[in-house]
């Protein structure tokens, strides 16, 4: 691949500027979910083991180019120390004399956290002058923030141009998984796209029909496709104004030889709440006063067949209203089937998206997937076929 990893760099005695995403939830000065911090720990450990000095660059919140005390990274220091098993020094600026002095004081094995990059207006402007000031603080640049790579900011893009650059372990894992899923995948490839609305996932659907062999459309957005084909979906969540777009996507899929799998049966209810009275009907038989909240068993069987015949799965968006039982049934069944096929070695499975990750966790399937991306917007943009500036900068 066109980028270097930590294995390609000589880190001994070097100051390594590491761009991380530690934009974690904090309440009353305490980190309430340290997932993002734990995920960068291998990169920090690796740099230290190779004799390098990690200097962490990160954003936090949206201070819009001004110093906002509540958006300081300093309260994260104890959580970083716990995750790294090392003491972490802090400097109240990510550039300038104070930062230069803090870096100069680093001993072998020390870790330094620099203050929120977004306290400087140049960060979000991808300002080369700000990046040059940051570049003075390191010998090597390592980007471990895939989840921030869809933004061309000084610490994700311009800085990568000014120092020898490489991907950190988390970035490397993410890029490797995404490449295996959509870049040069083992075929056949099946994509499952669900969720609430077509309008938020138009570019995604447009890109996937060009790249995958089978596209399963589920969740609320399937209703829009059914309605576009003249089917009455009753009171279901449905974007009727998107009918022409849905038809275009179907036509594009047909032209590209991408099979589309829409629900053939659906689970309908009169109320959107847990354990609402429900029935399973054919996809074209939703009662006028009911709404479609999940795919039915015949649809699940068809999805299972598609997965069993696939070598690669890419998944974004739940197949139904998974937050309320029993309308999580199709999502759970497909998730467990994908997990079992992955465990048996016949399927490479990659999934991402906030609700998707929650749904796969709820199904007890997430741990068996090949890769679960927690990158949110960057994952979606990558699936949409867009070039991510933070990744492109590593490739030069
Ligand atoms: P992600 O965050 O993984 O990208 P989305 O936000 O696009 O996923 O979609 C998740 C939402 O879609 C969930 O809140 C789920 O309840 C909703 N949803 C899925 N199917 C339906 C449906 N048939 N009717 C209403 N909402 C649905
Ligand atoms: Mg969501």
Image: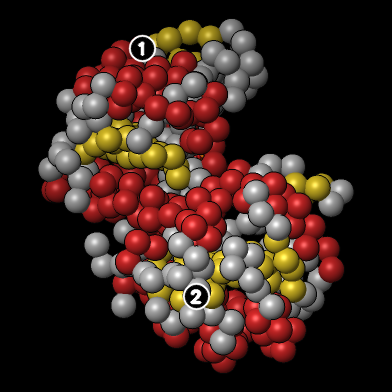
Q: Nearer the viewer, residue 4 or 183?
A: 4
Quarter of the figure that contains the N terminus: bottom left
Which residue carries the number 1 mark?
297
Q: Position of residue 144 (x, y in %)?
A: 48, 60
Q: Residue at x 74, y 68 (%)?
A: 90
Marks 1, 2: nearer the viewer: 2
Q: In terms of image quadrants, where is residue 22?
A: bottom right
Q: Residue at x 54, y 24 (%)?
A: 362
Of the numbered discs 1 and 2, the one sitting upstream in the chain is 2
Which residue carries the number 2 mark?
14
Position of residue 47 relative to residue 136, above or below, is above
Q: In the rendered image, is residue 250 in sight?
A: yes
The alpha-carbon separation of the residues under discs 1 and 2 comes to 58 Å
Coloring scheme of the render?
secondary structure
Q: Secondary structure at mark 1?
A: helix
Quarter of the figure that contains the C terminus: bottom left
């Amino acid at each position: 691949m066109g980028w270097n990893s930590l294995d390609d760099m000589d880190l001994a005695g070097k100051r390594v500027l590491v761009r991380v995403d530690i934009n974690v939830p904090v309440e009353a000065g305490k980190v309430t979910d340290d997932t993002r911090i734990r995920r960068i720990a291998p990169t920090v450990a690796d740099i230290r083991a190779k004799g390098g000095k990690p200097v962490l660059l990160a954003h936090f919140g949206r201070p819009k180019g001004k110093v906002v005390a509540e958006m300081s990274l300093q309260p994260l220091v104890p959580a970083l120390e716990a995750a790294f098993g090392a003491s972490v020094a802090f400097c109240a600026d990510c550039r300038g004399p104070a930062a230069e002095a803090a870096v100069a004081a680093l001993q072998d094995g020390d870790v330094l956290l620099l203050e929120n990059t977004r306290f400087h207006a140049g960060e979000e402007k991808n300002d080369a002058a700000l990046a040059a000031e940051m570049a003075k603080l390191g010998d090597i640049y390592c980007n471990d923030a895939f989840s921030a790579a869809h933004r061309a900011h000084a610490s994700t893009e311009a800085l990568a141009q000014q120092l020898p650059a490489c991907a950190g372990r988390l970035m490397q894992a993410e890029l490797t998984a995404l490449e295996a899923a959509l870049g040069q995948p083992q075929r056949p490839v099946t994509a499952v796209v669900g969720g609430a609305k077509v309008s938020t996932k138009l570019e995604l659907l447009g890109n996937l029909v060009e790249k995958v062999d089978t596209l399963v459309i589920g969740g609320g957005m399937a209703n829009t496709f059914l309605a576009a084909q003249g089917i009455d979906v009753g009171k279901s969540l449905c974007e009727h104004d998107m009918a022409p777009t849905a038809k275009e996507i179907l036509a594009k899929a047909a032209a590209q030889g991408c099979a589309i799998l829409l629900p053939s049966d659906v689970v309908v209810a009169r109320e959107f709440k847990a354990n609402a009275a429900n029935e399973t009907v054919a996809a074209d038989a939703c009662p006028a006063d009911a709404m479609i909240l999940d795919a039915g068993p015949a649809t699940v069987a068809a999805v299972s067949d598609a997965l069993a015949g696939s070598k690669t799965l890419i998944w974004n968006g739940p197949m139904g209203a998974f937050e309320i039982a029993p309308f999580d049934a199709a999502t759970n069944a497909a998730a467990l089937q994908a997990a079992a096929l992955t465990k048996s070695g016949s399927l490479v499975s990659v999934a991402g998206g906030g609700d998707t990750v929650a749904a796969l966790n709820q199904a007890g399937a997430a741990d068996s997937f090949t890769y679960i991306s927690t990158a949110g917007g960057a994952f979606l943009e990558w699936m949409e076929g867009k070039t991510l500036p933070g990744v492109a900068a590593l490739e030069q």
